[in-house]
Image: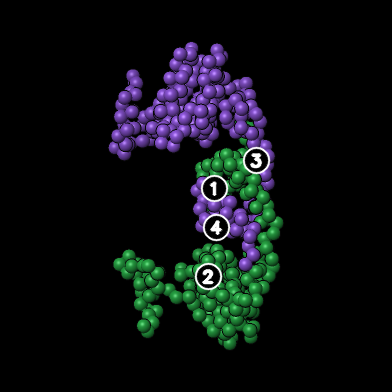
Chain colours: A green, B purple
């Protein structure tokens, strides 16, 4: 059976996160059934994206221009730098539509287990930016995990001598959350971080 | 933020079965991180596949040639036609490496609920093939679902007057299955289909 093109396609599709061999097969059949409406547009958009996408040399975001749209947007408050682990975190914060400052994408976290040190992350450029006198606040928005918090502590150590305010996004009860269903860690963090009402 | 290319790509990727908006976003970031090793090869293989893939006019299989590799393979036993619902079922049977005959892909099942009648399926061509004197056996391998069995019964009604043997793949206990964990339907089918030992 000559289905080399199909097998190659299944092979590469199955490497996407969230897709295994079986779901890649289903995806390929779905693509073939919807050639005009899905397969050809997908090929085109993926080719376009791979052609146009740049990694922002300033903040590590991805965009079709470098520096990225956020870094070059005059309406954004460039005094504020929100530090995130990955571009997906940046997208998540952008969707909330609350933050009007700029970002810095680390590209991961420090990890003793996985052997990732500061030199593996986009940290030096952050230190450099934090020392710039136009920057007034560094907001740490790494994940509330051990590695995320370790990274936040490390960054704090590196920039606390600079004249810049360091803050961290709040950890506490998620909106809509019920106390009875929360884990002890979140509840403890929420209590420790209580504020005057 | 100008990320139109990215958003278009996320839009189309999220239409694949098994991928939602969130996993499509993760997939896009993964693609961008692995541009050389994954994104570009994926674009190329998808373009190749969309260029080369044909639906076999004889059996409904997909391949880069028409008639497909199975239909044109002289080593396959063309007297036997295994009737399956979808190309994915054909692939599944091929992986088992047991069947050496040819196939006929219906493209779905009859369904009263979804309003699919015989005219929506690739049935007429099967009847025609079953009437061919070179064909000795039609093996019904539709799913063991209500719709699959309804379809099998319908096909039997249409071809039972022809001089062709009609068989159905066995329904019973899956290999490695334990009786205690099986549903009543499977156990009942296995008992009803018992054979001399």
In percent of width and height, residue A56 lies at 66, 68
Quadrant of the frame with the C terminus of chain B: top left
Residue at which label 3 appears:
B49
The count of marks equals 4
Tell me which chain the residue with mark 4 is part of: B
The residue positioned 57% from the left and 39% from the top of the image is A33
* Quarter occupied by residue B66: top right
Q: Nearer the viewer, mark 4 or mark 2?
A: 2
| Structural crowding at the residue carrying mark 2, measured as other residues with C-alpha within 10 Å and reported as few (<14), some (14–19) or many (≥20) | few
Kind of element beneath mark 1: loop
Report how far apart the C-alphas of labels 2 and 1 lie in the structure: 28 Å
Q: Are marks 2 and 1 on the same chain?
A: no
Instruction: Quickly name the residue at label 4.
Output: B26
Local secondary structure at mark 4: helix
Res A97 label: 2
Q: Where B49 sits versus B195, above or below?
A: below
Question: Going from the N terminus, do you reach mark 3 or mark 1 first?
Answer: 1
């Amino acid at each position: 059976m000559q289905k080399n093109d199909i097998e190659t396609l299944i092979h590469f599709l199955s490497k996407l996160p969230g897709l295994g061999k079986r779901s890649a097969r289903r995806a390929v059949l779905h693509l073939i059934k919807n050639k005009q409406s899905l397969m050809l547009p997908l090929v085109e958009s993926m080719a376009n994206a791979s052609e146009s996408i740049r990694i922002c040399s300033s903040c590590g975001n991805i965009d079709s221009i470098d520096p990225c749209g956020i870094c070059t947007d005059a309406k954004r408050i460039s005094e504020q730098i929100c530090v995130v682990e990955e571009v997906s975190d940046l997208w998540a914060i952008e969707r909330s539509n609350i933050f009007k400052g700029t970002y810095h994408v680390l590209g991961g976290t420090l990890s003793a287990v996985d052997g990732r040190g500061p030199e593996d992350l986009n940290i030096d450029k952050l230190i450099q930016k934090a020392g710039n006198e136009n920057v007034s606040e560094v907001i740490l928005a790494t994940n509330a995990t051990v590695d995320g918090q370790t990274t936040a502590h490390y960054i704090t150590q590196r920039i606390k001598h600079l004249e810049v305010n360091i803050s961290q996004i709040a950890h506490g009860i998620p909106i809509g959350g019920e106390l009875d269903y929360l884990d002890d860690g979140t509840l403890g963090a929420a209590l420790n971080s209580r504020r005057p009402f």
